Image (cartoon, rainbow, N blue to C red):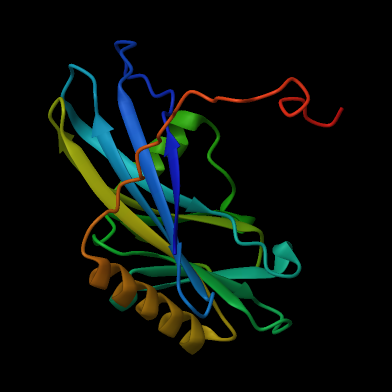
C-alpha cells in the first residue's frame, strides 16, 4: 500500500524566482524492514537549472549516538550506520534506487560539522565517496547526493530512496535489495489520486459542530 504526500517547497533560485513542485509517494514492504520514498520534482518556473543536486540526508542515532560508525556498500548504493560497541545489533541505512550517487558524505564526530550552509552545500555537491576514512566512533550524519541535474522549464525528474534496517549488515543489505526489487517491479511513480470535492447537503448545525 502506498501513502501520498503532496508538497510545494518554498525553493527560490538566486534570482528570487520560485517554481519547484514536489510530489512524494511512500510505500513499505510487507516485512516492514524498509520503506521507499519516491519523489517527482517538477520545474514549474520559467528558468532552466543546470547545476541542481538532490540529497537524501539521514541522521541514524543507534543506541548511544556518540558510539556510531558509518559504512558504505557501493554494490548496493547503501550508506549505513551501526553501533560501534556491539550493543543492540540493528543496522540502519539508505539506498538510492534509480541512480548511482554522485557523492556520499558523512560529517560530525571527529570530522566536525560544516561551518556554514554554503560549506554544507559545497560538500554535498562535490563528487566522490567520503564515508570510510578515519573510523572513529561518534555522532555522524550521512547523505547521498544525485546530480548535477539539468532541468529545462517544465521538466520533471523522479528519484527514489529506500530507508532500511537489519539485525546485522547482511540483513540490512537484504532489506535494501528487497526494496530495490519492489521499486523495480512498480516501474513508475504512482501519482496521487485527484481529490473530489462536492457540495455538502442536508447538514444540520449540530452535525457540523465538532467536540461541542
Quadrant position of the N terminus in the picture: bottom left
Quadrant position of the C terminus in the picture: top right
Q: Is residue 81 visible?
A: yes
Q: Residue at x 29, y 53 (%)?
A: 190
Quarter location, residue 202:
top right
User: Residue 15's spot in the image, x, y percent?
Assistant: 29, 11
Residue that protrudes farthest toward the front in the picture: 202
Relative to 166, is 69 above or below? above
Q: Is residue 48 left or right of residue 71?
A: left
Between residue 97 and residue 135, name the one nearer to us.
Answer: 97
Between residue 162 and residue 142, name the one nearer to us.
Answer: 162
Q: How many marks?
A: 0
Residue that protrudes farthest toward the left in the picture: 152
User: Residue 130's spot in the image, x, y percent?
Assistant: 40, 60
Between residue 90 and residue 137, name the one nearer to us.
Answer: 90
Quarter location, residue 184:
bottom left
Q: Residue at x 54, y 75 (%)?
A: 32
Quarter location, residue 69:
bottom right
Q: Residue at x 55, y 34 (%)?
A: 115
Q: Is residue 171 left or right of residue 54?
A: right
Q: Is residue 136 visible?
A: no
Relative to 62, is 192 above or below? above
User: Residue 66's spot in the image, x, y percent?
Assistant: 72, 63
User: Residue 207's spot in the image, x, y percent?
Assistant: 74, 29
Q: Is residue 15 left or right of residue 104?
A: left
Q: Is residue 30 left or right of residue 55?
A: right
Amino acid at each position: 500500500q502506498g501513502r501520498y504526500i503532496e508538497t510545494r517547497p518554498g525553493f527560490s533560485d538566486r534570482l528570487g524566482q520560485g517554481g519547484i513542485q514536489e510530489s512524494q509517494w511512500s510505500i513499505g514492504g510487507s516485512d516492514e524492514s524498509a520503506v521507499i520514498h519516491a519523489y517527482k520534482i517538477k520545474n514549474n518556473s520559467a528558468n532552466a537549472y543546470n547545476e541542481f543536486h538532490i540529497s537524501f540526508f539521514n541522521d541514524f542515532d543507534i543506541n548511544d549516538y556518540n558510539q556510531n560508525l558509518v559504512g558504505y556498500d557501493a554494490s548496493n548504493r547503501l550508506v549505513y550506520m551501526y553501533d560501534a560497541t556491539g550493543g543492540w545489533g540493528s543496522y540502519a541505512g539508505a539506498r538510492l534506487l534509480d541512480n548511482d550517487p554522485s557523492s556520499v558524505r558523512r560529517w560530525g564526530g571527529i570530522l566536525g560539522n560544516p561551518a556554514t550552509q554554503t560549506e554544507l552545500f559545497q560538500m554535498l555537491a562535490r563528487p566522490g565517496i567520503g564515508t570510510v576514512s578515519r573510523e572513529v566512533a561518534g555522532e555522524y550524519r550521512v547523505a547521498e547526493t544525485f546530480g548535477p541535474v539539468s532541468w529545462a522549464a517544465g521538466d520533471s525528474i523522479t528519484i527514489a530512496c529506500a530507508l532500511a534496517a537489519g539485525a546485522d549488515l547482511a540483513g540490512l543489505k537484504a532489506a535494501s535489495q528487497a526494496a530495490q526489487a519492489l521499486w523495480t517491479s512498480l516501474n513508475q511513480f504512482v501519482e496521487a489520486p485527484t481529490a473530489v470535492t462536492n457540495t455538502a447537503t442536508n447538514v444540520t448545525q449540530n452535525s457540523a459542530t465538532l467536540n461541542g
